[in-house]
Image (cartoon, helix red, strand yellow):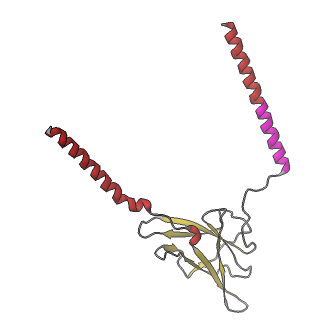
Amino acid sequence: MKNRHSWILKKAAALLIALTLMMSALPAAMAVAPDWSDLKITVSWVDAATGEAVYADAAPVYDAEGNFWIMISPEAPLDGLTIFVTHPNGTYQISPAAGEALGYVTVVGDTIDGINYLPITVTDPETGSTETYFLYISTTAPQPVTGEPTEDPEDAARKAAEEEAARIAAEEEAKRLAEEEAARIAAE
């Protein structure tokens, strides 16, 4: 009987150790990435004509999570932009740092092209987790064109005809296989 209680105590101790290890990892597992739409991104520059500072705020692109869009004046000096990125949770480490000069940036037209963006990294110093967000700067469009590109009517008609032909071919093949199977069964 003593061996039976010893076995139960060993199992209980192993379970307690496993639970302790899981609980110590729980805070890291529960760490959440910052809400990307709470980032506030402002770009500033000095107007050449007036000598005054000009500011523009970026907006999150909700159709493309993690992306931000900002329209600046076409006269803004692309080699004289300064960025300010903040988050309501002030403990995050953000790069580029607030007030950092961007140097020469590349602008986009009216779409998120996946190439011409400024990466913004946000790191939680407690967990070490890092998220990267993308800022698109445009001089022509206040918001990007998003959504699926429209398909050319001729391409759509060709695609529909190909799909119909493939469906008919599949039906004919299924019918042929069924006839072969019926003939095989009849021959037996």
Q: Can residue 80 be seen in this view?
A: no
Specify whether residue 10 is painted magenta. no
Work out whether 147 lies above or below 76.
above
Q: Nearer the viewer, residue 28 or 73?
A: 28
The reply, left or right, for residue 157 in relation to residue 111 is right
State which quarter of the image contains the C terminus: top right
- Decide whether the magenta segment is chiefly helix, strand or loop: helix
Position in image of residue 163 (x %, y %):
78, 38
x, y percent for residue 183: 71, 12
Q: In x, y percent, where is residue 53? A: 65, 88
Quarter of the image with the N terminus in it:
top left
Magenta stretch, residue numbers: 153-168
- The answer to which of 173 and 11 lies nearer the viewer is 11
Image quadrant assignment for residue 118: bottom right
Question: Looking at the picture, does residue 102 appear above or below residue 24?
Answer: below
Spot the residue most to the top: 188
**Farthest right residue in view:** 154
Residue 43 occupies quadrant: bottom right
- Residue at image x 54%, y 67%? 35
Where on the picture, by quarter, is residue 159?
top right
Q: Is residue 167 above or below residue 75?
A: above
Residue at 24% x, 49% y: name it: 13
Q: Which residue lies furthest to the front in this view?
A: 1
Q: Which of 62 and 92 is in front in this view?
A: 62
**Residue in the picture at 70% in, 14% down:** 182
Asked whether residue 155 is drawn in magenta, I would say yes
Q: Nearer the viewer, residue 27 or 50?
A: 27
Q: Where is residue 104 in the image (x, y as percent from the top left)?
A: 64, 76
- Count how many numbered circles sit on residues in the image: 0
Q: Is residue 70 visible?
A: yes
